[in-house]
Image (cartoon, rainbow, N blue to C red):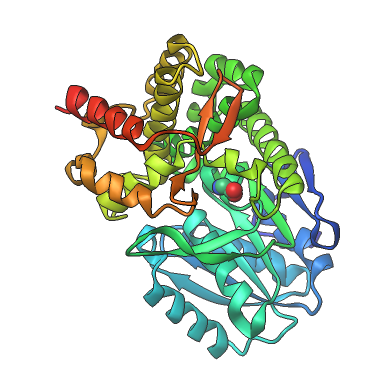
Amino acid sequence: MSANELEPDSRVQSSDTVHVALGARSYDIIVGVGLLSEAGKHIAPLLAVPRTILISDENVAPLYLERVAQSLSNHGVACGRIVLPAGEQSKSFAQFEDLLERILAAKVERGTTLLALGGGVIGDLVGFAASAVLRGIDFIQLPTSLLAQIDSSVGGKTGINSRHGKNLIGSFHQPRLVVADSAALDSLAPRELAAGYGEMVKYGLIDDVEFFAWLEANGQQILSGDEAARRHAIAVCCRAKARIVAEDEHESGRRALLNLGHTFAHAFEAESGYGGDLLHGEAVSIGMGLAFRLSARLGYCDPGDAARVTTHLKALGLPTQAADLPAPARRRDALIEHMSRDKKMKDGRLNLILARGIGRAFVTADVPPSDISSLLDEFLGTEAS
Ligand code: GLY
């Protein structure tokens, strides 16, 4: 380690490494406090040639871009820099085109590696660009939001949104490495952090009731900045995600469980216009509550479990009811229309994730559309303000 790193390495006390086992496309996720300041040490050994393009957004770049660039330089790695507008609206055709042109203008070569420094939007956009430019080059994820650290930076899903819905255009393209610096969470707005926490709860609900119970006891510490709690929870989620992705990289089965609550969530987000009125994790929070309500309604799970899910999400400040949705996302017919175009449609039926209880999620295409409509009627009608 060079003496002129911007941050002293004393902040990196220790780190956890989670391996994503995908044969030739295997990679590690490193989780720890202060890792961005030593990013170069982890990145340099993986590069075909010591050339990278570091891509971030206008919110994250002022905080961390130079820190990462300095660490790369200390390890003999050159880096170009591209800074994009922040926000979900950057996952558009227009921004994708602009990004590709800027990468090409930076004289990218096949051996160049793209580095995605930011939240889920930057990760999805840069990953998709890496899969497309020169027919595919390497990329590395440096996630700075909780949502990106525990979910979107791992597993190789990349893409952009269409006016027909979220993430409908994209590719599977695995990163070469994920470096999750939990200290970056300190700079997140409380609302962003809570939204990421919604995705964290998802892992407990899918297949780990003990983790859900741990979150019930310790979730508040994650939001209030306890480093040990954060690192533990991020590593648990990354291990869960790595396991699922290793079993089913292209989502032909088990990986679909990670979409718990997402069919509802994507419809809410599309109707809200991706403009920041409703964050992805907030939409997922409401969606997971609905998935459990639907499970209870269909007799798969105890209504007490559905109530326990919403009680916890609500206690941690996440939205759970119709009144929490922006007005455009409370229109039943528009929501149903969006859901009917979901990626998870199979033979004209919605593939939904339901649960037999907390930690017992399953995929089914057997939900009659009339039950989804009545659930939405009940949710929007009785709880809307
Ligand atoms: N975020 C869901 C997945 O990666 O499959």
Numbered label tally? 0
Residue 269 coordinates in the image, percent (x, y): 33, 48
Residue 309 coordinates in the image, percent (x, y): 46, 20
345 sits to left or right of 137: left
Q: Nearer the viewer, residue 304 or 85?
A: 304
Question: Where is residue 274, by image quadrant?
Answer: bottom left
Q: Which residue is located at x 44 percent, y 29 percent?
A: 291
368 sits to left or right of 334: right
Q: Which residue is located at x 66 percent, y 67 percent?
A: 70
Q: Which of 201 and 235 is in front in this view?
A: 201
Q: Which residue is located at x 82 percent, y 50 percent?
A: 21
Residue 189 visible at all: no
Image position of 181 with respect to 55: above or below? above
Where the C terminus falls, by quadrant? top left
Where the N terminus falls, by quadrant? bottom right
Image position of 184 with respect to 105: above or below? above
Residue 16 visible at all: yes
Question: Where is residue 11, by image quadrant?
Answer: top right
Residue 76 coordinates in the image, percent (x, y): 78, 74
Residue 304 coordinates in the image, percent (x, y): 45, 9
